[in-house]
Structures are given as C-alpha cells and as structure tokens.
Image: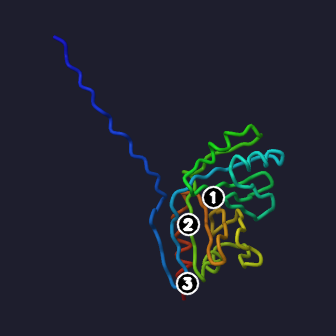
C-alpha cells in the first residue's frame, strides 16, 4: 500500500533588521538623542587610481580631503583615511553590489550588521557630543559635512555633522548601549 505524501509549504522567513535599542530616544531641553533606522554600510579601501570608477559605481563622489563627506540620493561617503571610506546608504540600495560592478582595484566589506547610528540634534547637540569627544566640534573646526573617526568616552565612533545643530554618531552595535547611555547622560547635563 503506497503512502500518500503531503507537501507542506514552509513558512517563508521573516527577516527584519532592527538596530539594537530600536526606537530608543531621549529628549531633554535643547537636545534629542535617538537611534536611527537601519542603513546599508560598507567599509571601502581603494587606491587613488580607482576613485573615479568607484565614484561612478556608487553614484557619489568619494571625498579625497580629510574630515570631509559627500552625499547624494540618500548615500553618504565619509573620508576616513587616504585610502579608506565609510559608505552609508539610507535609501535601501546595496553599495556592496554597486562596487561589484566595477573592475577597479578595491577592497570592500559589508558592515551593515556591525554598526548602528545615533542622532544627536538640537541647540545643545554640540555640547552633548563634546562631553565625551576630545575633538573641537565648533562649527569653524567641524563644519556641516565634516566627518571623522574619533572616540566618545571609551568607544571608537565615526562622527558626521549633518547640520549646524545635529550629528550622526556611528558605532559598533556591541558598544551602542554604552554610547547611547553616555550621550543621554550628557544631554541631561547639557539641559541643566
């Protein structure tokens, strides 16, 4: 007697990447600290000769001067060193796949799951970030669009000034609680 076989449809996996502490926010007089939504990120290393081809592939001109960034269509390229950039895509596109389209010499690593971003905004944003960052964050020294790998307290971060009164703080997911807590305490202090 033959057994009847029943095919069961496997449930399709539900994959939604959420940053650590998704939705976490703190508002204090003059400053707001909040986790930003997920973004695609790559760490890019390339020689000078490859920059034009990679800029075309990514759709944003890779900056070549220290402490600079460039943004176009939801994608930001941050200069981190003479041959190193952090690319952040907030538009839902895949910069890793875009880099694969060029044969120009480069090395690229997807770091979307490693990093999270925290926004610090408001009139007291500079004071809040400065409480744990040794860099001069005045508008003259760190203007809009300035980007830097630096430290906040005891954690390495990548800092981007997005407006005169706001910053994007990129940190490793494993340090996000520490960074968020430090910024929250600094925001509360800045409000007093």
Classed neighbour count for the residue bearing mark 1: other residues with Cα under 10 Å, few (<14), some (14–19), many (≥20): few
Between disc 1 and disc 3, whose residue precedes? 3
* Residue placed furthest toward the right: 49
**Residue at image coords 55%, 84%:** 30
Disc 1 versus disc 3: nearer the observer: 1
Quarter of the image containing the C terminus? bottom right
Residue to which mark 2 is pinned: 118
Residue 102's mark? none
Q: Mark 1 points at which residue?
A: 73
From the top left corner, tell me how far across and down residue 27 is, in percent.
48, 78
Which of the labelled discs sits on residue 30, or is there none? 3
Task: Report helix, strand or loop for mark 1.
Answer: loop
Q: Quadrant of the N terminus?
A: top left
Q: Residue at x 57, y 58 (%)?
A: 90
Q: Label 3: few (<14), some or many (≥20) within 10 Å?
A: some
Q: Position of residue 32 (x, y in %)?
A: 53, 77
Q: Nearer the viewer, mark 2 or mark 1?
A: 1
Residue 144 occupies which quadrant of the picture? bottom right
Q: How far apart are marks 1 and 3 (CA)?
A: 29 Å
Mark 3: secondary structure: loop
């Amino acid at each position: 007697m033959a057994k009847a076989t029943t095919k069961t449809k496997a449930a399709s996996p539900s994959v939604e990447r959420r940053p650590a502490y998704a939705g976490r926010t703190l508002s204090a007089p003059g400053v707001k600290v909040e986790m930003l939504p997920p973004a695609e990120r790559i760490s890019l290393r390339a020689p000078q000769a490859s920059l034009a081809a990679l800029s075309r592939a990514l759709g944003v001109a890779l900056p070549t001067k220290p402490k600079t960034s460039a943004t176009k269509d939801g994608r930001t390229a941050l200069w981190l060193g003479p041959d190193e950039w952090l690319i952040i895509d907030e538009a839902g596109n895949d910069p890793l796949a875009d880099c694969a389209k060029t044969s120009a010499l480069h090395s690229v690593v997807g770091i979307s799951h490693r990093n999270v971003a925290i926004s610090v905004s408001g009139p007291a944003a500079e004071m809040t970030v400065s409480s744990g960052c040794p860099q001069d964050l005045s508008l003259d020294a760190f203007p809009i669009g300035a980007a830097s790998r630096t430290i906040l307290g005891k954690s390495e971060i990548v800092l981007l000034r997005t407006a005169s009164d706001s910053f994007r703080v990129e940190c490793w997911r494993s340090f996000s609680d520490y960074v968020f807590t430090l910024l929250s305490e600094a925001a509360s202090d800045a409000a007093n």
